[in-house]
Image (cartoon, rainbow, N blue to C red):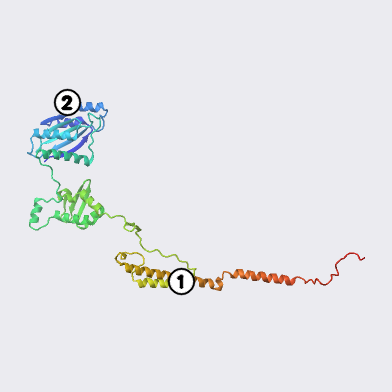
């Protein structure tokens, strides 16, 4: 079973100085392994990129007893071909531990293009792991299995066989319950505490403490379902969208009806009030059969829809008649006679004209006017 670790360094010489003395077998890809430091530095100097990151290190480990040092070094060379094409790579095989492993030192600058080796983040690590798994499978070697969602120790399995539950299982049950009912870490930890379990988050790891048993355990010991990434993914699934708007209807979250605008200074006509009362009575008589389209209108037969349409038409005509009567009665009242001011003005003008005529002196045209001067007599 081969595993991978990937890192980077600002000193290529330091990486080689560590790996070379401990190597049982060594080889070079695109370089002479005995002069790896000099050749790698020359490449970096040619392209003027001898600063910052100078090398990347890759550790390839194998399951004890699966490979010999020579086989391990050959597998490391094949991995270098896949991972670092165009780069200089020194492969050093160590046998100082139970498992044989390779140290691959990759020069940061490509010999052909001058571009730097890019291996950042989880995505790059996963790509290297996939390449390594492919090589191992081609040679009949085992590869790492997917982490178990729930991990049980031998002692836990023994308790389960006896029908008993361990304190670790009590933590698992509390975590399962809490993560399904919360959407953030704060509320998760508060609910978990009520269940008798304390939780601490330290970087990428989570530690659970069984308060009654006063025992601690890391999430990785319980299984992948209880680790940080799984827990936080559960929060994202359980988070709800904002309720400011109803996405199904496009309406505001506050669906309370708005009160109609009223003016207390307006005295409504009794006839119009009767019309409103008729409207309310008609609405009550329908007993939920609305004129507008509702959720049940799709279930009505065509003849029922036509009947409702006729009722709506009759109601509209009756409302128009009642409104017209009320308006006409308002206009017919003396105080609302629109022609009265005009007629009153005409009457006033007539009275003024008659009074002026009576005040003027009457001149009798058939009587001589003795005051008239007709000139000297002849």
SS type, badge 1: helix
Q: For this view, does 294 lie left or right of residue 69?
A: right
Image spot of residue 70 (x, y percent): 9, 32
Task: Using the image, determine if residue 99 lies above or below residue 213.
Answer: above
Q: How many numbered circles does the render carry?
A: 2
SS type, badge 2: helix
Task: Using the image, determine if residue 45 lies above or below residue 229.
Answer: above
**Label 1 sits on residue:** 321
Q: For this view, does 351 lie left or right of residue 362?
A: left
At horizontal 32% and vertical 69% (from top left) the residue drawn is: 303
Image spot of residue 46 (x, y percent): 25, 26
State the image quarter where residue 243 is shown.
bottom left
Classify mark 1: residues with Cα within 10 Å, few (<14), some (14-19) or many (20+): few
State the image quarter where residue 274 is shown.
bottom left
Image spot of residue 93 (x, y percent): 12, 33
**Label 2 sits on residue:** 35
Classify mark 2: residues with Cα within 10 Å, few (<14), some (14-19) or many (20+): few
Taking depth in this image into account, of 11 and 339 the one nearest to the observer is: 339
Q: Are marks 2 and 1 in contact (CB under 8 Å)?
A: no
Q: Earlier in the sequence, mark 2 or mark 1?
A: 2
């Amino acid at each position: 079973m081969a595993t991978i670790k990937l890192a980077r360094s600002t000193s290529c010489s330091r990486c080689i100085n560590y790996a070379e003395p401990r190597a049982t077998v060594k080889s070079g890809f695109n370089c002479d392994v005995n002069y790896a430091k000099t050749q790698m530095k020359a490449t970096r100097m040619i392209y003027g990129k001898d600063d910052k990151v100078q090398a990347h290190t890759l550790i390839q480990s194998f399951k004890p007893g699966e490979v010999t040092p020579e086989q391990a070094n050959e597998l490391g060379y094949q991995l270098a071909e896949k991972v670092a094409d165009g780069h200089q790579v020194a492969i050093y095989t160590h046998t100082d531990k139970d498992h044989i492993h390779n140290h691959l030192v990759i020069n940061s600058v490509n010999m052909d293009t001058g571009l730097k080796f890019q291996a950042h983040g989880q995505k790059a690590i996963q790509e290297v792991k996939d390449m390594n798994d492919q090589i191992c499978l081609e040679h009949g070697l085992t590869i790492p299995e997917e982490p178990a969602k729930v991990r049980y120790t031998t002692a836990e399995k023994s308790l389960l066989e006896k029908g008993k539950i361990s304190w670790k299982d009590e933590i698992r049950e509390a975590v399962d319950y809490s993560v399904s009912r919360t959407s953030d870490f704060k509320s998760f930890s508060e609910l978990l505490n009520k269940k008798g379990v304390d939780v601490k988050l330290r970087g990428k790891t989570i530690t659970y403490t069984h308060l009654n048993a006063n025992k601690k355990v890391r999430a990785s010991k319980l299984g992948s379902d209880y680790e940080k990434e799984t827990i936080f993914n559960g929060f994202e699934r359980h988070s709800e969208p904002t309720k400011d708007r109803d996405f199904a209807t496009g309406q505001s979250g506050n669906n309370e009806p708005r009160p109609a605008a009223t003016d207390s200074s307006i005295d409504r006509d009794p006839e119009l009030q009767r019309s409103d009362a008729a409207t309310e009575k008609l609405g009550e008589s329908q007993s939920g059969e609305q004129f507008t389209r509702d959720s049940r209108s799709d279930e009505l037969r065509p003849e029922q829809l036509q009947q409702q349409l006729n009722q709506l038409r009759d109601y509209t005509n009756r409302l128009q008649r009642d409104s017209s009567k009320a308006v006409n009665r308002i206009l017919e009242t003396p105080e609302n006679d629109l022609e009265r001011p005009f007629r009153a003005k005409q009457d006033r003008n007539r009275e003024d004209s008659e009074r002026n005529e009576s005040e003027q002196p009457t001149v009798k045209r058939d009587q001589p006017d003795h005051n008239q001067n007709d000139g000297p007599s002849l």
